[in-house]
């Protein structure tokens, strides 16, 4: 072999025509025209066409190229040439060809059902679409981290095994913890609240678990939750933080993942609009009014479900906030609005284009007696929350926080019509394999 370096499909495209290179990857498309074998190879960076031809490839390597099945791993060596007909305008004219791992008949050929594809998610995950989404997700994770660092937040690590509910008992996953009941966390919030007394501004990116009862396009049973909590901040300040975070992260995706967005055929104008906060704010009661105007039979006090949220997104081109929900629709920890104690100092951020809620946040109840009342009036056992109540006994401060559903946000950024493709291994009621 003339050189030992193994090139990726992208690196090869940077070489001068006429250069020699050894390139590795997996067979993505294969076409045997007798005298010529066309092989499109894919790797993590893209695709490259290789050609084995009687004109320049020794017979034994043409035979080897002919044998290379879809998804076989291969190494091809040859001369780089420009050809406008090749994807990306570059091809490799093979002088040697080697199958590293011969693939059995690959089960994905096009036209399979979603259920079947989910059964073989470990193979489906190689698709260019899912690869593009995972790369966008990587940029998003990096942007979160940089955003919080630039704002003086500390990254912390809360537990996943907990002894009480945060977001209501209905969606708790119970596990047997040495004979005692324990639960997979629904949200790190209560632990983040503990940590603001030492660090003041904290954030985490961790899984949350919800045993959802309804099956929808936007619910997972295990999802990644970006959560933050800050001391000395009221609801307005927290909403500003949320819109800055979403705008910053969206900007980063536009700047770094344009190729992936265009592969996914995402309309980036919609994302551009989201990079310019502030976002519109409406109160819950206005949302009810907007829905009634669309003919929805809904009254003050009713919850907003996926359908209602979708209708509301028709009024907005950017993400938008809904604030001041009726207290009884929200969790026990939320602080009532002092001007209208029937309403919570709570906000949701909804993504446009039919997506709906991507963030839930609020100012937290910081008064011991009122928090205790809220816990007992919802039928929760104050004993489970003694440590949480302690935070109101020892130097309580006004504080606020939020949680962003990472896959919900990815759905919107990447323009996905179902949340399953925003996460490599989606968990649903009937899906734990692979
Ligand atoms: O609105 P939620 O339930 O709020 C909380 O958990 C707060 N304790 C967060 C906090 O203030 N620290 O959940 C927050 C977000 C939702 O807006 C949604 O984006 C996402 O989590 N989410 C889900 N994503 C996917 N699948 C599910 N089953 C989800 N449930 C909530
Ligand atoms: Mg919510």
Image (spheres, grey):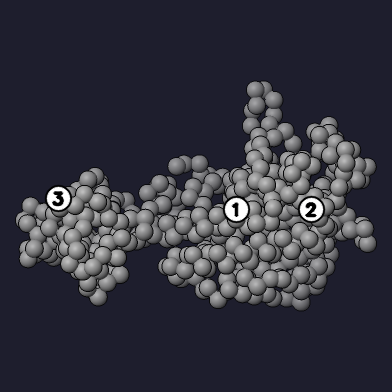
Local packing at callout 2 (Cα closer than 10 Å; few below 14, some 14-19, many 20+) is: many
Residue at (72% x, 60% y) in the render: 241
* Quarter occupied by residue 385: top right
Where the C terminus falls, by quadrant? top left
In the rendered image, which residue does mark 1 sit on? Answer: 145
Which element type, helix, strand or loop, lies under badge 2?
Answer: strand
Secondary structure found at label 3: loop
Disc on res. 180: none
Residue mark closest to the camera, 2 vs 3: 3
Residue at 9% x, 59% y: name it: 57
Secondary structure at badge 1 equals helix
In the rendered structure, are the residues bearing label 3 and label 1 in contact, judged by CB atoms less than 8 Å apart?
A: no
* Cβ atoms at labels 1 and 2 below 8 Å apart: no
Residue with the mark numbered 3: 1
Q: Is residue 20 visible?
A: yes
Disc count in the image? Answer: 3
In the rendered structure, the answer to whether residue 417 lies left or right of residue 24 reads right
Name which residue lies at 75% across and 55% down.
361
Say which residue label 2 marks.
400
> Is residue 51 visible in the rendered structure shown here?
no
How far apart are labels 3 and 1 at the CA level? 44 Å
Residue at image point 67% right, 39% down: 158
* Observer-nearest of 398 and 309: 398
| Residue 357 coordinates in the image, percent (x, y) | 67, 61
Decide which of 209, 93 is in the foreground and name it: 93
Query: Where residue 77 appears, x then y in whole percent?
Result: 18, 56
Answer with mark 2 or mark 3, whichever residue precedes in sequence: 3
């Amino acid at each position: 072999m003339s050189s030992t370096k193994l090139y990726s499909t992208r690196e090869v495209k940077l070489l001068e025509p006429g250069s020699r290179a050894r390139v590795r990857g997996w067979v993505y498309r294969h076409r045997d025209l007798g005298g010529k074998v066309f092989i499109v190879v894919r790797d993590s960076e893209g695709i490259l066409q290789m050609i084995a031809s009687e004109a320049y490839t020794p017979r034994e390597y043409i035979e080897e190229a002919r044998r290379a099945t879809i998804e076989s791993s291969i190494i091809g060596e040859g001369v780089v040439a420009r050809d406008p007909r090749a994807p990306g305008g570059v091809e490799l004219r093979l002088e040697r060809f080697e199958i590293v791992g011969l693939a059995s008949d690959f089960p994905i050929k096009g036209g399979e059902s979603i259920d079947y594809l989910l059964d073989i998610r470990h193979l489906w995950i190689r698709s260019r679409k899912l690869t593009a989404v995972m790369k966008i997700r990587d940029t998003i994770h990096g942007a979160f981290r940089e955003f919080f660092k630039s704002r003086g937040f500390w990254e912390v690590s809360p537990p996943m095994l907990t002894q009480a509910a945060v977001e209501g008992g209905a969606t708790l996953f119970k596990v047997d913890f040495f004979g005692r009941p324990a639960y997979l966390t629904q949200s790190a919030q209560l632990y983040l609240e503990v940590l603001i007394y030492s660090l003041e501004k904290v954030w985490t990116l961790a899984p949350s678990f919800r045993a959802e009862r309804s099956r929808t396009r936007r619910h997972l049973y295990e999802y990644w939750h970006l959560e933050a909590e800050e001391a000395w901040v009221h609801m307005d300040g927290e909403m500003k933080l949320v819109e800055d975070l979403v705008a910053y992260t969206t900007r980063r995706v536009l700047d770094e993942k344009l190729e992936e967005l265009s592969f996914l055929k995402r309309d980036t104008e919609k994302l551009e609009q989201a990079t310019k906060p502030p976002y519109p704010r409406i109160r819950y009661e206005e949302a009810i009014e907007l829905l009634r105007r669309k003919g929805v039979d809904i009254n003050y006090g009713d919850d907003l479900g996926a359908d209602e949220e979708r209708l509301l997104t028709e009024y907005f081109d950017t993400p938008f906030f809904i604030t001041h929900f009726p207290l009884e629709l929200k969790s026990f920890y939320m602080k009532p609005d002092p001007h209208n104690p029937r309403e919570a100092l709570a906000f949701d951020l909804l993504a446009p284009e039919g997506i709906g809620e991507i963030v839930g946040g609020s100012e937290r109840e910081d008064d011991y007696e009122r928090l205790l009342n809220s816990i007992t009036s919802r039928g929760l056992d104050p004993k489970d929350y003694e440590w949480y109540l302690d935070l109101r006994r020892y130097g309580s401060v006004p504080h606020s926080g939020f949680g962003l559903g990472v896959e919900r946000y990815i759905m919107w950024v990447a323009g996905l019509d179902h949340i399953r493709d925003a996460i490599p291994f989606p968990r649903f009621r009937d899906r734990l394999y692979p």
